[in-house]
Image (cartoon, rainbow, N blue to C red):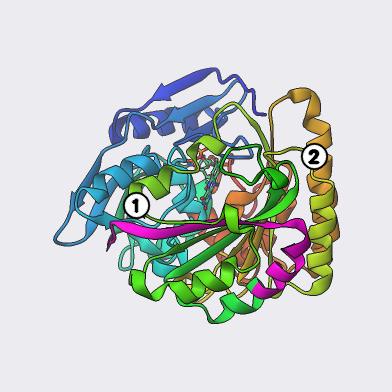
Amino acid sequence: MVARRPGLIAHCADVSDVRTAVRIASDIGILTAVRCGGHSLAGFSTCNGGLVIDLSRMRDVSVNPDARRARVAGGCLLGSIDTATQKAGLVFPSGVVSHTGASGLILGGGTGWLTRRFGLSCDNVEAFTLVTADGSIARADSKENMDLFWALRGGGGNFGVVTEFELKLHPLNSVVLAEGLAPEDNIRKLLQCWRGFMADAPCDLKWNLDLRLAPHKSKVPAQLHGRPVAGNSLIWTGAPEAVEPYFQRAFSLCHPDSVRCQTVSYLDLQTMADSDFPHGRRYYAKSGYFNYLDDVTIDRFLEALATIPSPATQIELAYLGGVAGQVAAEETAFGDRSAPFIINLLANWADAVDDALHVSWIRSVFAKLRPTMKPGVYVNFMSGDEQDRVPEAYQQRWERMVTVKTHYDPGNFFCLNQNVRPQLYCC
Ligand SMILES: Cc1cc2nc3c(=O)[nH]c(=O)nc-3n(C[C@H](O)[C@H](O)[C@H](O)COP(=O)(O)OP(=O)(O)OC[C@H]3O[C@@H](n4cnc5c(N)ncnc54)[C@H](O)[C@@H]3O)c2cc1C
C-alpha cells in the first residue's frame, strides 16, 4: 500500500550513527522517517524524497536472567526479543506477529497474548534511551525526565529515536492454546456469552474473537468452508488443570470438529500468526473501543460479516482488562484503559485494483459502529488518513502530550507518526 522512495537511507549501526543522522537532517531540515520493523499501517516509516533512519542493524538483545531484565536495541523485531528471553525461560509481553518491530509497537502501547496477564508492552518498560531532535541523548525512567517517560509509554515516535529499551521480563515457557470456529447461526449467542463472561474472567485467560469467512483448509470442517464464522482463540497461562471450565464454556457454541486444544511453547505461540500477515499484502484498518457490546452493536457486526469482501479480512475483537486495565489512565500516555472491548477492522487483500472496495468497506462498517463506540483509539491500529483522531487517542492527556512534545521537539522534526504537533508550530 505504501510505495514511497526516500532520497537517502541511513543504515545506522549504533547510537553515534543515529545522532549524526538526526543532527544533519535536523540542521538542513529534511523530511525524516524512522524505521524499526516497517509495520506502520500508515506508512510512517518511509517517505518520498527525504531521509529514512533505518535501525535494522541495531538488533542486540541482552538478557539478565537473575534480574529478569533485558536491554533491547531500537531496531529489534519482536521475534529477536522472544528468542533471546526464552533462552532464560522469560517473556516480554508484546504483539502476536514476530516480524513486527518492537520500537513502534512498544512506543504506541503494545497489546498481545499476555496483555491481561502482564500488562501492555509499554507498561513493562523501565527506561528508554533516545536521541532527541537536537541530536542529544536523553534517558527517561521513573526518576529522570519523568514527563518524557510518561509520554513515551503510548506516545509513539513523537519524541525522538529510541535506541535502547530496558524491559521487565516474566517467567513463562508455554501456554495452553485452544481454538474453535462458531458457525454463523451461533455467532450472536457467542458474542453475548463472551461480553458477559470476560468481565469476571481471570487474568490468566485471553479470549480473542475474529469474525471472518472460514478458510478452505483441511482442518476446517467442510460445511464451514467459505462461510461466515467466529474464530475463537484462547490462551491460558495458569495451572493447566484449572482451564477446563473456561474452555468448555467458550467452545459450547463451536463446531465440535473445529475445536483444538494443546500446550504450545511460547515461541510457537508468538509465530503462529506470522504467515497470515506476510509482507507485500495490502492492509487497511480502523479501530475503536466499546464500554459494552450492546445488541445493536452485535447486529452491526453480523451485518458487516455478511458483506465481508475477502477471505483474509476480519473483524478482530479482544477484551483488555486484566493487569493492563489496572493501570490508571493518567499513569501513561496510552489511552484510557477503562473500555475493555477493543475492535480492529482489518482488511487484508492482494491486488491494488481492489483497494477502493476494501477501504470503502472498512470505512462504512466503522461509520455504522462509531455511534456506540467510546471515544478513543489505539494509535498503533490507525491508518494514515486519521490524523484528526490523534487528539481523541489521548483525550485528557492531550495537553500534557503537547507540552512534552513542545519541550523535546519544538520544530516537529519527528512528524512521521500519529503526530502530536508542538505549540506555535504552523506547517
Ligand atoms: C502484521 C501486523 C501485526 C501487528 N500486530 C500487532 C499486535 O499484535 N499488537 C499491537 O499492539 N500492534 C500490532 N500491530 C501494529 C503495530 O504495533 C504498529 O504497526 C507498530 O507501529 C509497528 O512498529 P514497527 O516498528 O514495525 O513499525 P515502523 O513502521 O518501523 O514504525 C512505526 C512508527 O514508529 C516509529 N518508530 C519506529 N522505530 C522507532 C524508534 N526506535 N524510535 C522512535 N520511533 C520509532 C516510526 O517512525 C513510525 O512512526 C501489527 C501491525 C502489523 C502490520
Q: Position of residue 204 (x, y in %)?
A: 42, 71
Query: Which residue is at 75% across, 24% downward?
Result: 352
What stretch of residues is rendered in magenta? 170-193
Residue 74's image quarter?
A: top left
Specify the amino acid type for callout 2. Answer: Pro
Q: Please name the residue that numbered disc 1 is placed on.
A: 266
Query: Which residue is at 84% across, 70% downward?
Result: 296
Is 376 rendered above or below residue 32? below
Q: Say which quadrant the N terminus sits in.
A: top right
For residue 3, side relative to residue 53 (left or right): right
- Decide if residue 345 is in sight here: no
For residue 186, side relative to residue 105 (left or right): right
Q: For residue 309, which numbered disc appears in the image?
A: 2
Q: Report how many numbered discs are placed on residues in the image.
A: 2
Element type at marker 1?
Answer: helix
Q: Earlier in the sequence, mark 1 or mark 2?
A: 1
Q: Say which quadrant the C terminus sits in.
A: top right
Specify the amino acid type for callout 1. Answer: Tyr
Residue 310's image quarter?
A: top right
Nearer-the-camera pick, 73 or 15: 73
Nearer-the-camera pick, 71 or 131: 71
For residue 155, side relative to residue 352 (left or right): left
> Mark 1 and 2 residues: CB-CB less than 8 Å, in contact?
no
